[in-house]
Image (cartoon, rainbow, N blue to C red):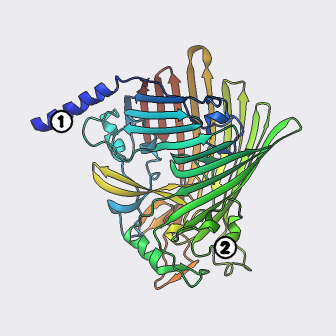
Amino acid sequence: MHSGEFNHRLETKVLLIVLILISVSLHANLVYYSIGDQNVGVTPIPSEWVGTGDESSGGANKEFTIKFVPTFYIAQWEDTFVQPKIYGGPAGWYYPTSPANPTFYLQDELPSFLEFAFNYKIDGFTLFMAVPVEQEYRARLIKLDTMNNFVTDTYFDINFPEYAYLYYATPKVYASIGRNPIKWGNAKYPVTISPTTSLDNLTLSIKFPNTIFTFHAITSNVELCDAELQIQQNFADNQSDARGPYNLPAKNIFAHRLDFYGNIFAADYRIGVGELNLVGGRFPDILDLSPALIYHNTFGTGYSNVIGSADFDLTYGGTKLYGEFALDDFETPSTEGGSNYKPTAYGYNLGISQSFGADFNIWAERSFTSQWMYTTNYLPYLRFNIRKFKINNYPGARYLMDYPLGFAYGPDATITALGMQGQIGGIDLQYSLEYDYLVKGQVNDGGVVRWRWFWDGWTNNVSGNATPTSAEKTEDATYHILCAKIDWKNIEIFSNIVNFEQYVVGASLKYEF
């Protein structure tokens, strides 16, 4: 090692040690509920809505905190990402990539070595930003064999922040803009909007008597690989007007929903209905984003794709029954160009949880998405996924990472999940255990078998100067997934196991200053 490089690394380590000596505390602002908790149709909600915020104070509050989380691993895990051959790759730069196959999102779940959080509150406004210091996106997997998450060189992740937002909240109104996960419904694995990744969003929620209205505007990175760009520029929807194809660099999702709350026969219920309107290849106008319209009836053929959804929960004592249904398309021979224009595509989940007091909960659910769910349109900008640009310098790559907006395992997937969680109050210990049986649809992509993902769109809804192509379906893959976690004071022990072939067992020490 050269002396200059040694001195630089030593200075980096000294700087980190100095920084973790700064101390202040941080309070939660946005609240996420887990299975068995309070009935809420959309999360997160502001702390002011659950009585944990300072709703009446007119004063100012400025806070800063540092989290130091050294973590130690024993692991055997895949460290490469699957990319489609159908677009001419794989390729390291500006090319579509899956964050789930075969890594199961582990790179997103591993704890950061260090995190700086800024939290400002004044007169109903809250500004929050978390800045992690962690290994690079793919390097987190590559460096699992070092058995720790220490950042010991200049190759640290610069894709931050993943969590940052500004919101205003009163007891009846909540408005926010920023980057954070969003979840619709009560399921562990929702099919309409899931908390699989943070979303760049603008959100407005209003409490009316027995009803909550919610509106989201969500955006996605619009960069395409060369083959995707050719598709977007040269193919038009068969029902498009004379201006198609629509190929401006724009992909935005507008969502609205109503949640109705009540009580019947001593049971609390919630019924939610909503829509997603994906506008791609064209910049949206008021018609596209209006929260008060029915998006299906804006008829933006050629540049719009709509999903309708409904979900519910019913709670009696410690028992909760919940479910969700989302419809992407329904094949009807008499409309939309005939029976072969688009396929029927839908998803659902159904679950039950049982709480035994405040200290123990068990739950079970089943989630399903059909083969063409989220991908009933061949045009890249009209598929229901969230693309993120991820920089990686070790090794060098620029990933176009395609996360689900809905179900975490994308189209053509079924998961049966069982779980338990609880706490032992006398010793301040929390624990959780989850088993998932996943059946995932696969395709044969030029001789390579991989998961069906958002690249595998329906080909019969477009026309152009070439023949649209898609990978062919092949046999499904099955996975047994086991996840466990124990938290005691400032110690967390966790494990993920997939088919007893991939595993990671880790222990973290958590310090907040």
Instruction: Tell me what residue is drawn at x 39 percent, y 43 percent.
Output: 77
Q: Label 2 vs label 1: CA separation?
A: 59 Å
Answer with the quarter of the image where residue 5 lies: top left
Q: Amino acid at mark 2?
A: Phe
**Image coords of residue 366 (percent x, y):** 66, 47
Answer with the quarter of the image where residue 423 lies: top right
Instruction: Tell me what residue is drawn at x 71 percent, y 30 percent.
Output: 355
Q: Which mark is residue 435?
A: none
- Whether residue 3 is visible, yes or no, is yes
Farthest residue in the front direction?
A: 58
Residue, disc 1: 8
Pick the residue in front: 78 or 95.
Answer: 95
In this picture, residue 319 sits left or right of residue 159: right
Farthest residue in the top direction?
A: 426
**Above or below for 332 versus 93:** below
Q: Amino acid at mark 1?
A: His
**Above or below for 218 versus 503:** below
Q: Which mark is residue 299?
A: 2
**Above or below for 339 versus 10:** below
Instruction: Tell me what residue is drawn at x 35 percent, y 66 percent.
Output: 89
